[in-house]
Amino acid sequence: MRIAQVAPLYERVPPVCYGGTERVVSYLTEALVEQGHEVTLFASGDSLTQAKLISPCAQSLRLNPDCIDNLAYNLLQLEQVFQRADHFDIVHFHIDYFHYPFSRRQKVPHLTTLHGRLDIADLVPLYREFDDMPVVSISNSQRAPLPWIRWCGTVYHGLPLDLYKPKKERGQYLLFLGRISPEKRPDRAIEIAKRAGMPLKIAAKVDEKDRKYMENEIRPLLDHPLVEFLGEVGDSGKEELLRNAYALLFPIDWAEPFGLVMIEAMACGTPTIAFRGGSVREIITDGVTGYIVGTVEQATQALKGLDAFDRTRCRSMFEGRFSAHRMAENYLKIYERLINADRRHARWRSIDKSLRRTAIIEPRPKTGNAVILDRPRPNQSSSLMAQRAQAPRELGNGQHRRGTDAPAYHERARDTE
């Protein structure tokens, strides 16, 4: 199969440090190449891959101090993709909704994995218009705000089995790994460590938009003998931290779309103490790969039950559920369905117009000179149109704390790790 993978340009593929979406794109791309598929990766020029690489920029945008207008490179990337679209059996986008107007106007099958949060009121009018776009969720819970759009499946993220080496012996410290932001709640992690009387290592990046939160809310809490702030770490540093931790703390306060760090800990045999919300119940098997809690008190109590935790069993659960090979196989099934559906539509469109008229059982409604607006497109079912008509017009209190203007569309995809 000839497959295009379109990655965000914000980070390298795979990223040097933080970057959940680009990391997953890398694992998927390499797994598809290993299975014999012809894969082209559209990503930043410093990306590392066995696939054919096409890039509009020499360096990832976040690490390029000379880059002022990110949008210019994102538009150039789309032009590169659609110039070559006819060369592929399917184009798989990981750049959110930015390509929708372009994809609607070309005939090559395409798919979009939505890596970010969807409980944003601004997305409702967007998806009321683009409800024909085939999309994939990374957890079932992610779909809740937009259940009526064209979901083609849920595919959980996966890692190469040889990426992390498990460790049978438990460590002596707690670990918070990811981003410093209000929804990730590093303050909860610090409080849990203090109550448990255990050392806490915080390995996390700080985005510019979260700098004020870091300085005002978190920085004062770091002045404690049990707390060590390490900043952003790379892959090798991440593995050592995860393997040697007593437990990973995942004290989120939002609808987490997936949470890649949970399966990274699982691959090391390290248990996760996770606050319920979003995908957590789908990823963590309570009592096997960690514990699901609702309060700081429950998290502190759960730590006491980890002395007998079976790290080997935890690793086995990872191998069975979250390998990169399994992720690739699940995507290939969706690719095949979309390609076959497109071929059926193509055959139908190729039938002579007179023959198609005889194949229609019900006559077309007589409209005179009137124009029927919002006629269903060929790949939209009547049930989908009914769902679209009933689509909510607002999401209440679920609106995201940041805007979602086009230049920042890729930032929401960062919120997956």
Image (spheres, rainbow, N blue to C red):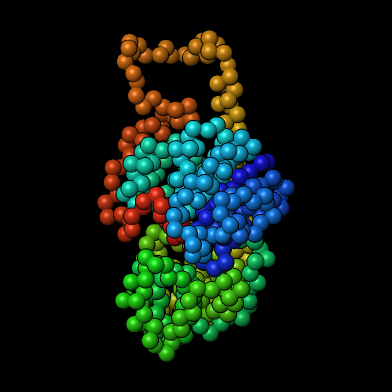
Q: Is residue 139 visible?
A: no
The x and y percentages for residue 408 are: 41, 54
Q: Quadrant of residue 377?
A: top left
Question: Of 180 and 249, which appears nearest the observer?
Answer: 180
Outermost residue, left direction?
396
Who's the residue at 28% across and 42% down the image? Answer: 393
Tell how many labels: 0
Who's the residue at 68% across and 66% down the image? Answer: 162
The x and y percentages for residue 91 are: 58, 42
Question: Of 317 and 63, which appears nearest the observer?
Answer: 63
The x and y percentages for residue 163 are: 65, 66
Who's the residue at 40% across and 74% down the image? Answer: 186
The x and y percentages for residue 414 are: 46, 59
Can you say which quadrant of the picture contains the N terminus? top right
Residue 53 lies left or right of residue 148; in this view the side is right
Relative to 296, is 103 above or below? above
